[in-house]
Amino acid sequence: MAATPRLIDGGVTTQGQPFLVMEYVEGVPLDRYCSEQELSATARLSVFRKVCDEVHYAHQHLIVHRDLKPGNILVTAEGEPKLLDFGIAKLLDTPPASPEQTATGLLFPTPLYASPEQVKGEKVTTASDVYSLGVILYELLTGRRPYDTGKETPVLLVTAILQQEPQGGLSGDLDYIVRKAMRKSAAERYGSVEQFSDDVRRYLEGQPVLARKGSFRYYTGRFIQRNRMSAAAAALAVLALAGGLVGTLWQARLARREADRAQAANHFLTEIFEIPAKDSSSRRDLTVRELLELAEKRVPPLLGSDPAVAADVDYALGGGLIWQGAMPQARTLLERSLRHARPRGSPQNRP
């Protein structure tokens, strides 16, 4: 339900002046209310949307306010804004004010909040109120006027409204929203106050705003911002999956490397024990200890090609020599195996 003050009476004075009797409103101007309550930007946007609801209600009843400004919007103690001063409001189906009327100030709105078409005396539509609301929102969010005119004379203000762009002070989507509402051309503004308010809602909810033609990165960023927990969980799941995959591949690589080393070591030892069968000059069968000692002499060449395989062979040969009772030789092989199997600087020993 609209919070616009109720019309009680109206008429014309004996001097010919029209008048309206409106419901009394207990409240403070919009800008003062936001300052005194020390409202955050989010809270100011929420109050502003309520103002938009009131203006939209008037538009639905074919009334353009034409003089929207913080002083004409009072906010009650309950935080409800109410529109005042419909003194120059007009029905949408009445003829526009003539340039002469505008020039003499008979129907001229407060200059700072007037739209370009108003200061030029052109046809006024709901887009004019959209522009004024854009100026109001700019002030509520930045605490300053949108145009830098130095001395604020009517002529300089009109020139700024027609030619200048709003000063910086806003960033991101809010800047796009305010600039769209304050376009010089009425056709380039929001199509209605309702659309303006809805874009503010989109901003508050972290959704892409209509005022900004965003890229894929922009829409993705907005989606992530709205779904931070879900996005974080998805990211962790991806990382876990990637980590598991990397771990699996690493383990497979290690297993393959260990298998290759074992195969090389077994191949070397097999060749050692086949020496008597291949060597026809041998006059007798070699003992196990002699074979192990023979194999020990063939290990050093492996150190240059594959120290890891050589370390495995030394370890196997050392164990065999222990069983043969050749403790000094076994100790030498086992120590050499340890040196080549352990990474330099590592305190870990071979198991």
Image (cartoon, helix red, strand yellow):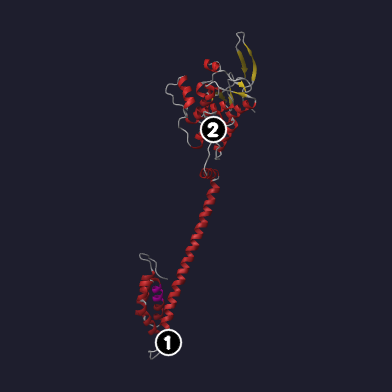
**Residue 74: horizontal and vertical position, in percent?**
56, 24
**Residue 256: horizontal and vertical position, in percent?**
47, 69
Asked if the stretch drawn in magenta spans residue 233, the answer is no
Q: What residue does disc 2 label?
A: 45
- Calculate the distance from the C-alpha at mark 2 to the C-alpha at mark 1: 95 Å
Tell me which residue sits at (45%, 72%) in the image: 260
For numbered disc 2, what is the local secondary structure?
A: helix
Q: What residue does disc 1 label?
A: 277
Visible in this render: residue 115?
no
Give the residues drawn in magenta, as a range: 309-315
Q: Which badge, 2 or 1, is on the more N-terminal residue?
A: 2
**Residue 7: horizontal and vertical position, in percent?**
64, 19
Is 38 placed above or below 220 here?
Answer: above
Which quadrant of the figure contains the C terminus? bottom left
Residue 191: image quadrant is top right
Visible in this render: residue 122?
yes
Which quadrant of the figure contains the N terminus? top right
